[in-house]
Amino acid sequence: MTSIAEILADRKICICAGSGGVGKTTTSAAIASGLAARGMKVAVLTIDPAKRLADSLGLEELGNEPRQVDPALFTEAGVEMKGELWAMMLDSKATFDELVERNAPDEAARDRILENRIYRQISNALAGSQEYMAMEKLYEIHQSGDYDFLVLDTPPSRNALDFLDAPKRLTQFIEGRSLQIFMKPTGLATSLIGRGSAVMFQVLKRILGFDLLSDIGEFLQAFSGMVDGFSERAKSVSALLADPATSFIVVCGPQGEPIEEAIFFQRKLLEAEMPVGGIIVNKVHYEIDGGEGVEKTLINQLGVDSDLAARVSANFDNYRALASRDAENISRLSRDLNAQTVIRVPYFDEDVHDLGGLLKIDGYLFASGDEREQMAAS
Amino acid sequence: MALGVSDLLDKKLVFVTGKGGVGKSTVALSLGLAGAARGKRTIVCEIASQENASRVFKRAQVGFNEVELTPGLWGISIDPDESMREYLLLQLKVKAMGDLLMRSKLFLYLAQAAPGLKELVTIGKIWELTLPDRKVKGMEPYDLVIVDAPATGHGVGFLQTPRTFAEIARVGPIHNQASTLAAQITNHDETGVAIVALPEEMPVNESASLETQLIDDVGVAVDRLYMNALYPHLFSDTEAETLAGLRESAEGPTKAAITAAMSEHKRATVQHAQLERLKEMTRTPVTELPFIFKPQLDLGDFNELSELTI
C-alpha cells in the first residue's frame, strides 16, 4: 500500500479520471494542495463550472489563467505551505478561440471562423471539444514550464474516457476526406465529387435544410487552412498524455456501479497505453471486526438503557453492512487491477468543501498504507 | 399536499435531472412505480446508461426496445444512434436512404458538426413516446413518460438542445422538428421536471443554481426537488452526548459501535442543516427520501421509495 506521494514521485502531471459524483474535483484539489504544501509549485486545472474548487480554495472565482491560492489559508488551517498552489477553471470556448487565433493563416480567416455560427456552437458544445480543450490547456501550461506539477480534473462526461480520443476525433473531423464535398464553392455536385456524394448532398439537404448545410460548408472551408496546425498540436497533446511523466489516477466511490466503472476505466486506459498510477476510492466505510454482543455490553457494563442500546446496535449493524459491501467491492477492484495501487479515503462525518477538509483527505492520500489503516481505525 | 407529486404524476412527461451520482435513476424508477401503481401506463427512459431498471427487475438488458418490467411499467434504454436511425427512417420514409446516411462517413462528421444532434434525436424519441398516436408502427401510447436525464455536466444543455437547434437551423425540417420539441418541453401543463439533490454543501448549491437555470433560462416547470439519501435522526442530542461520555470507557466493537452512532448523529445533523439550506435557497417543494442502509437496493426498496416520492 503506497501513498500518493510515491505514485507521483518523478512525475510532472496527474490526470484524475472517473465518472461524475465520485469526488474527482475534491480529490484533484487535495492532491494539488498536498504537493504544494510539500514544496512544489503546483497548478490544478478544473473544468467543473460549479465553483466547487474556487469555493474550497477560498478563491472568489477561477479564470482561464491560473491564480494563486493565498498561502495564509494553509497557515490558518495549521499546515505549513512550502510551495505554491495555483488554480484555474477551464473556459473551453476561450481556449478554442486562442487555438484558432494561433493557427489561422491570416486575420480574415480567423474572423471568418470566430464569427461562424457553427463554430460558435461547436466551441461550446461539440461532444469532445471540452475534453480536447482541457488537454490543450494542460499542454500549453506544461509547455510554459512555469510549474513543477500539474493536476487535471477531467470533465464529467458520460463516457468519461472521451478525452482520450478527443484530439483524434477533432482532427479527424476537420481533415476528413469527405469534407472535400464542401471545398469547391460552386461544385457541390460536380463530377469531381462523384454521383454518390451528390445523392448524399440531396439527402442531407432534405434532413438538415439548405441553410444549415451551407453554414456547415462555410465553417469547414474556413477551417481547412488550419488542419495541419491542428493535427500537429493534437499529436503533441496525445504524446503528452502517454508520456511517462504523466500519471492517470482513477477516482471512484465504493458502491457497486462506480467500482465497475473504475475497473472499466482502468482497463481502457491500459489498452490505450496510458500510464495508470493507481485508484482512489472515496467515502469508504472501513470494516470493523466483531459486533455481536454489543447491545449486551452497552447495557450490562456501561449502563445504557435498553432502548438506546438496541438502536446503537442496529445502527452498528447498518454500518457494518455498508462496510462489508465496500470491502467486497474494493477487493474485487484490487483483484481486477492486479498490482495497481488502491488508496481508500474514509467516509468523513462531515462533507468536504473547504481547505480544512482537503487537508484532511491529504492526510490519507499522503500516508503510507499502515498509517492509513491506523488513522481510519481511531 | 395541494402541490404534491400528484401534480408531477399528472403530467405526460417528467424529466428527472441533477448532477452525476445523486441517485437520478433511483428516483426515476421510483416515480415510474408510483405512476404504474396509480393505473397509468408508464415508461421509464434511461439514456445511453447502464440499465439500472433491467438490473432491479432482474431482466436481460432492455436496449432500444419497450419492455414491460412489471404490470403497468415499461422500460427503454434510448441509444442516440438508434434514435437517429429511427428518426431518419420516419423522416425519409425510404429505408435505403436512411441506411445510406447512417453508413456515410460524411453524415457522421456532420452529426458531430451539428452540435447536439444526438441529444436532439434522443429528445425526439422521448417525444415520440408521449404521442397519443405513436409514429412507430404498432406501438401503444403511454400515459406517463419518465426520463432519467443525463447528468448535468454541461449545465442544462440537454433540455436546452431543441431551442438551441431551432436557432441554428433557421428554417427547414430540423428547425420545425426542434421547435416542436422546444414547445413540448416548456409546456408546463404537460411536461414537468424533478431535480434530485444530496444533503451536502456543494450538491445543495448546485441544485439551487440548476433550479434557477431550468426555470429562468430554459423555461420549464420545475415541480419537485428530491433530497435523496438523507440520514435519519436515530439519536437525540442528549443521547449523543451520553454516548460520547461513555466512548472512552468502552473498548473493541462496543467502542466502534458508539463511534458509529456518534457519526450517524453528526451526519444526520449536518444533513438536516443542508436540507434546511436547500429549502431556503429554492422555490420548489422539497421531498425527503431516506438513505437506505443496504449494499444494493432491490425491488422492495424501490416500492417503498415509490410511496415516499408522492
Image (spheres, rainbow, N blue to C red):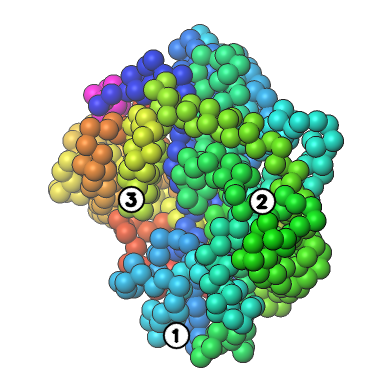
Query: Which image quarter: residue A242?
Result: top left
- Residue at the disc numbered 2: A180
Q: Relative to residue B76, is residue B178 drawn left or right?
A: right
Q: Is residue B31 left or right of residue A366?
A: right
Query: What amino acid does circle 1 point to?
Result: Gly
Q: Chain of mark 3?
A: A
Quarter of the rendering containing residue B157: bottom right
Instruction: Please tell me if label 2 and label 3 are on a single chain.
Output: yes
Q: Earlier in the sequence, mark 2 or mark 3?
A: 2
- Write the start and end of the magenta stretch as one range: A367-375
**Label 2 secondary element:** helix
Residue type beneath disc 2: Gln
Determine which residue is flagged by label 3: A260
Q: SS for tag 3?
A: helix
Instruction: Tell me the chain of label 2.
Output: A
The residue at 34%/47% (across/down) is A264
Nearer the camera: disc 1 or disc 2: 2
Q: Which residue is mark 1?
A: B72
